[in-house]
Amino acid sequence: MGKIFFLCLCVVLVSGCTRIPQPAGYAFSEQQKMQAVHHWDVLANDVANQINSELVSRGLLDTPVYVRHRCGQPGACGAMGGTFSFDEGFNDLLITQLVNFGVPTKAKKDAKGLIVDYKVQVVYHQANRYQWPKPGVLTALTTGIMVFRNAPFEIAAIAGAAAADSLLSTSVVNGHYEVIITTSIVHDNLYLMRKSDIYYINDADVRQYQQVAPADELELTSTRF
């Protein structure tokens, strides 16, 4: 009788300790990774297309725009307003795309027209994050191996190569950094359009997306002997 009471007491205590919600992962989704200047141009084209569509819908197609980079915090763009690789590259690519869409774009800011500004925020995740293949890939690979296990060597080799390609195509090395790129159309202190895009980036490329302080730059480029 004493053992049964002790067991019931343990069950009550354990159940009482597990009342908080249990952590659960998100459903499978995809997020693109920026790894080339071409990817910057693809984003610039998408942003310019949305800006053009917004101006058309508002009857402002003939209204000139001026592109500028907006810092989230004072001094975030550098003490002297310095730039970085993505800042300069995306600025030029966005202006080019706007001109190609026929949007009147000014080279210098003045009191007239609309402001198209963009902000780049780098997000660092300290924890290691794991990437598993897309759902169904491992099942497909296992099925393929089972089907071809008694096949001639040549066919089995082809199947193995195809399986490896499928696995590699769904596997992306995750780093610790992501970027949020937000583009807006502002007029009279009001947002007419706002678009935010999120991308993975390689750890080694983080300096392309933020202003690097001299001390940090020295530390990153120093060599140990």
Image (spheres, grey):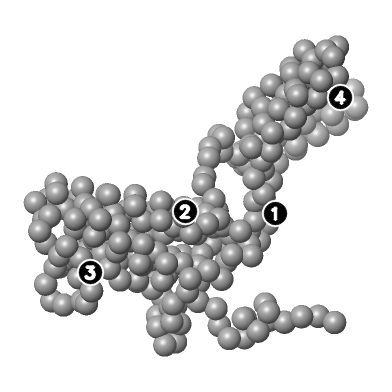
Query: Residue 196 appears at what percent x and percent y?
Result: 38, 54
Which residue lies at the image location 26% right of the left edge and 64% below the top edge? 116
Q: Which label is found at residue 39? A: 2
Query: Residue 132 appears at what percent x and percent y?
Result: 68, 38
Query: Residue 195 appears at what percent x and percent y?
Result: 33, 53
Which residue lies at the image location 22% right of the left edge and 77% below the top edge? 108
Locate residue 85 relative to residue 173 in the image: left or right: left
Which residue bears the numbered disc 4? 4
- Mark 2 or mark 1, whichever is nearer to me: 2
What amino acid type should be assigned to the residue bearing mark 4? Ile
Query: Element at badge 2?
Result: helix
Which residue bears the numbered disc 1? 128
Query: Element at badge 4?
Result: helix
Residue 27: quarter of image? top right
Which residue lies at the image location 44% right of the left edge and 57% below the top edge? 40
Q: Which one is earlier in the sequence, the residue at label 3 or at label 1?
A: 3
Which residue bears the numbered disc 3? 66
How packed mark 4 is, by other alpha carbons closer than 10 Å (few <14, some 14-19, many 20 or more), is: few
Q: Which one is earlier in the sequence, the residue at label 2 or at label 4?
A: 4
- Mark 4 or mark 3, whichever is nearer to me: 3
Q: Kindly report the distance in space between the C-alpha atoms of the residues bearing marks 2 and 1.
A: 25 Å
Query: Residue 155 appears at what percent x and percent y?
Result: 78, 18
